[in-house]
Amino acid sequence: MPNNNIAPFVKWAGGKRQLLDRIAERMPEFYGNYFEPFIGGGAVLFGLQPQSAVINDINPSLTNTYKIIRESPDSFIREIKKIDCEMWEDGKKYYYALREYYNKKLMNEEFDIELAALFVFINKHCFNGLYRVNGRGLFNVPYNNSRQESIDESSIMDVSEYLKKIKILTGDFEVACNEAKAGDFVFFDSPYAPLNPTSFESYTKEGFDVESHKRLAALFDELTARGCYCMLTNHNTEFINELYGNKDYKIDVVSVKRFINSDASKRTGEEVIIRNYQRRY
């Protein structure tokens, strides 16, 4: 991995910072372009820092923030510092007022610098950095009672400089892989399959259901046939093992900590790292 560390600018449920070393040691030794169709907080991207990459997410507010930080870091920093400095004595009321304003802009599709700053502010001040929306697509995560600063300025500038060479897409994961060719590396950090198979939930209004996971598995097969190196992480569930276990893929089970669960006894678990190639390490 590169020596210079770039920290993600948002916290993201299911982020892979704790798995980064285990992902890095399983990477192909050489590859062409890097593709990440479910970018989320970007822990793997910023940890590996590939020279040529295509990143994507279906969440337009998230990808807008990536683009704004890449293209207008100074304006973004000024905007979010203004939001931080104007915080009311009653932080809870301030958070909910900004959350409502953010949702109005979101519904009006106002993907601008102000929305990007609001996005990062609510991420830093909502419960566990969880991005969740209701059936209308409105962000509805409660306040975390924090008055922390939303960003580290130098980190934002580092992110901006690195993103200048990165292609950023917004949309379906399958479309994001259209240009992947033999020798390229595709990392899939898709929404988790639920530990309880009867409780599929989604983090965007578009959802990621059983059929989406089946479509992702089919894409994994297609990219394998194309000659791409592919890696996928998810919960170690019967469903995921059924999708990938009957093929010539390498499946490693790794232990993880789960920080989201309110029940401390359930904050440890297992995930799988699935590859379509062999790597000695």
Image (tube, grey):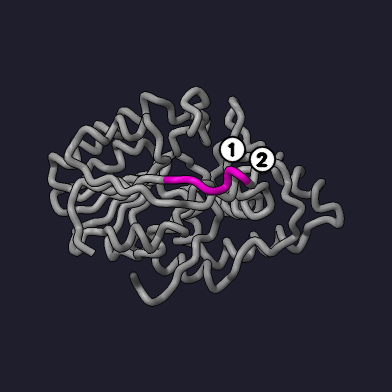
Q: Position of residue 127 (x, y in %)?
A: 67, 47
User: Does 220 appear above or below 21?
Assistant: above
- Mark seen at residue 132: 1
Say whether disc 1 or disc 2 marks the residue closer to the N-terminus. Answer: 1
- Mark seen at residue 141: 2
The magenta stretch spans residue 266: yes
Q: Position of residue 149 (x, y in %)?
A: 68, 64
Q: Tell me: 145 left or right of 151.
A: right
User: Does 3 appear above or below 97?
Assistant: below
Q: Tell me: 174 left or right of 113.
A: left
Judging depth in this view, the residue of 197 and 51 nearest the camera is 197
Judging depth in this view, the residue of 13 and 93 nearest the camera is 13
Q: Label 2 neighbourhood size at 10 Å, few (<14), some (14-19), many (20+)?
A: many
> Marks 1 and 2: CB-CB under 8 Å?
yes
Picture quadrant where residue 178 is located: top left
Q: Tell me: 15 left or right of 251.
A: right
Q: Position of residue 39 (x, y in %)?
A: 41, 49
Q: In whole angstroms, how far apart are the C-alphas of marks 1 and 2?
A: 6 Å
